[in-house]
Amino acid sequence: MRIDKFLWCLRYFKTRNMGTEACKKGHVKINGKIIKPSREVYVGDAIILRKNQINYELVVLDIPKSRVGAKLVDIYRKDTTPKEATAHTDLLKFAKEHYRKKGMGRPTKKDRRDIDDYLDTDESE
C-alpha cells in the first residue's frame, strides 16, 4: 500500500491529497529517509510523520484493506511517539484558555470598564 493511502487509512489525514502533499513537503520519513507519496509501506517499517508541529513516530503492524474506524487504528500501527512531543501543545491549549474561556465572546461593557479602570490606575502610579 502507498504511504499516502496508508496515512489516510489510519486517519492521520482527512484526504489522500493532504497525505500526498505532506510527503512531497518532506514531512513523512520511512526508516529515516524522506520518501515520495508512492513509496510502498511494509510491516515493520518505522514512520516519522510531522503534523501540527509534532513528530509522530509509528511502527507498521499490519496493512489495512481500506480506511478504518478510529477505534481500529491501533490494530494497524504502534504509536511510539514520546509524551514530551505532545506536552508542548497541551501547554499552549491551556494558555489560550487562561485569557478568556471558550464561548465567552467579546468583552462586555462591564469588562471594558474594568479594563479601562485597571489601565487608568496603572498610569497614575
Image (tube, rainbow, N blue to C red):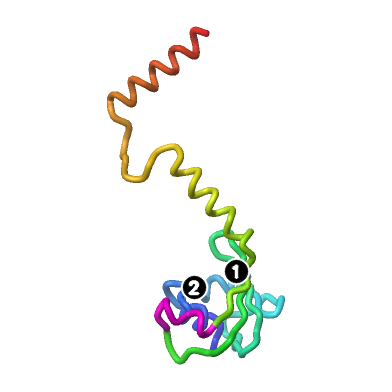
| The stretch drawn in magenta includes residue 73 | yes
Report the side of 77 relative to 118 (left or right): right
Question: Which residue in the structure is indicated by mark 2?
Answer: 12
Q: Residue at horizontal 42%, vertical 84%?
A: 67
Of the residues shown, which amino acid type is indicated by label 2?
Tyr
Between residue 68 and residue 39, name the one nearer to us: 68
Report the side of 92 relative to 113 (left or right): right
Q: Quadrant of the N terminus?
A: bottom right
- Name the outermost residue toward the bottom: 65
Q: Residue at horizontal 58%, vertical 87%?
A: 61
Q: Where is residue 125 in the image (x, y as percent from the top left)?
A: 52, 8
Q: Where is residue 7 in the image (x, y as percent from the top left)?
A: 51, 78
| The stretch drawn in magenta includes residue 62 | no
What segment carries the magenta color? Answer: 68-76
Q: Residue at horizontal 42%, vertical 76%?
A: 70
Looking at the rendered structure, the secondary structure element under dot 2 is loop
The numbered dot on residue 56 is: 1
Q: Residue at horizontal 47%, vertical 44%?
A: 96
The numbered dot on residue 33 is: none
Q: Where is residue 35 in the image (x, y as percent from the top left)?
A: 64, 79
- Name the outermost residue toward the left: 109
Between residue 37 and residue 84, name the one nearer to us: 84
Looking at the rendered structure, the secondary structure element under dot 1 is strand
Q: In which quarter of the image is residue 72?
A: bottom left
Q: How many labels does the image show?
A: 2
Of the residues shown, which amino acid type is indicated by label 1?
Tyr
Residue neighbourhood size for the residue with mark 1, other residues' Cα within 10 Å, grouped as few (<14), some (14–19), many (≥20): some
Report the side of 32 relative to 55 (left or right): right
Q: Do the residues labelled 2 and 1 touch (CB within 8 Å)?
A: yes
